[in-house]
Amino acid sequence: MELFNRLKKHYREGLPFVLYRKPGSSVCTALMQNSDSLDTTVDFSETGFVMAPFSEGLPVIRVRPDEVLTEKIRTAGDRMPFSRFMEHSGQSGKAEYIDRVRKALEVIKAKELQKIVLSRKISINLKPDPFYTFQVLLRQFPEAFCYFLYHQKTGIWMGASPETLLRYGKDEISTVSLAGTQKAVKGMDPVWSTKEKKEQAYVTRFIEQALDGLAGSLDISGTETAKAGNLLHLKTVIRAGDLKAGLRQFIHALHPTPAVCGIPADKARAYLLANEGYPRAYYTGYLGELNWNEDRNSHLFVNLRCMNLLDDQVHVYVGGGLVEGSDPEQEWQETVNKSESMLHLFRNSAEGLG
Ligand SMILES: C=C(O[C@@H]1C=C(C(=O)O)C=C[C@H]1O)C(=O)O
């Protein structure tokens, strides 16, 4: 755990860093800055690790790779069962959220919008050890993109994203369409409803249209079930070749996808900014490697299943897509299920609090 010890020292000195592990990998990479300056990207031609917010108002942070370390991390061992830890705190804010869901469904019914991805922030008073929490996260989400980013300006952001926004190479890009959520039950094959399939197909169609004109060839995979911690989603992989645009144009075409915002995107974003009742900050933004290694590939993920660790508070961010026919109670439950996948990481820390 040499890497963790180095980063703990860096953190104590107040210097920015990001530590991450790609899906299915056992290697963690750390990018460390040797000064506490806030760097950004002007045109996405720079190198490093970027973290962009959901919408304007916050900087796109770029962690400079002044020093880069990698280490194979052993996270084998049983995953902890996903507990119903903190169910009590999970219930607070229910009436308000259901009210917001109802209002959004009225807007959908009036055909003003086709889909709205509503979300909420759960705040708990807790001061967990971030390095310990990240180790648990790595163990619990082997199939996710796990990251731990620290900057004085933002505090700690940490998460386990199941969703690639954009994988960008010289000759090919790929992205995914992810939607529909249900709890994973051991030994049971999931059954997806027509509504869930339709919701996910909307996202695929949006991506197809967004890429129109930016690439000469498009390949859309079949749809399959993807696991993310204790949850399952429907997923389609979209690949495009014969590229006619650069990284920046692809990012702008894809972010925010209807998996995290809505349809039509601009109207849905305006609706959320006016009606969601809290600022999303970096949740549902995107983050990842920018022009990395010799081949200068970029690999960006949607910032989902994430949290912001501040001095003695943790904010956990969760949401879900609403379409015509969505049920407010079920939508609430979906956010509870998503929050459990994060909150149970603190089981041991919370026990320590007494
Ligand atoms: C918005 C979130 O997740 C997104 C919404 C989903 C849905 O509506 O079913 C599924 C996966 C994500 O694309 C979240 O996890 O907070």
Image (cartoon, rainbow, N blue to C red):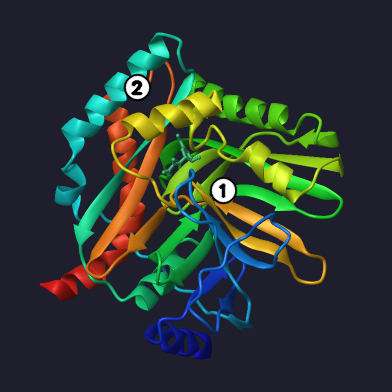
Residue 264's spot in the image, x, y percent?
A: 54, 23
Mark 2 against mark 1, which lies toward the viewer?
Answer: 2
Q: Which of the 4 image quarters holds residue 80?
A: bottom left
Tell me, yes or no, if residue 306 can be seen here: yes
Residue 71's spot in the image, x, y percent?
A: 59, 82
Which residue is label 2 attached to? 104
Q: Amino acid at mark 2?
A: Ala
With 78 as the anchor, is 102 left or right in this view? left
Which residue is label 1 attached to? 163
Q: Which of the 4 image quarters holds residue 45?
A: bottom right
Residue 158's spot in the image, x, y percent?
A: 43, 63
Q: Which of the 4 image quarters holds residue 82?
A: bottom left
First reached walking from the N terminus: tag 2 or tag 1: 2
Q: CA distance from mark 2 to mark 1?
A: 24 Å
Viewer-proximal residue, 187 or 33?
33
Neighbour tally class for label 1: few under 14, some 14-19, many 20 plus, Cα within 10 Å: many
Residue at image point 35% right, 30% down: 274
Residue 214's spot in the image, x, y percent?
A: 80, 36
Tell me, yes or no, if residue 187 can be seen here: no
With 92 as the anchor, is 208 left or right in this view? right
Check residue 338 in the rendering and tell me which mark sits there, or answer none.
none
| Label 2 near ligand 1 (CB < 8 Å) | no
Residue at image point 67% right, 48% down: 166
Neighbour tally class for label 2: few under 14, some 14-19, many 20 plus, Cα within 10 Å: many
In the rendered structure, are the residues bearing label 2 and label 1 in contact, judged by CB atoms less than 8 Å apart?
no
Viewer-proximal residue, 229 or 274?
274
Q: Amino acid at mark 1?
A: Glu
The residue at the far top in this view is: 110
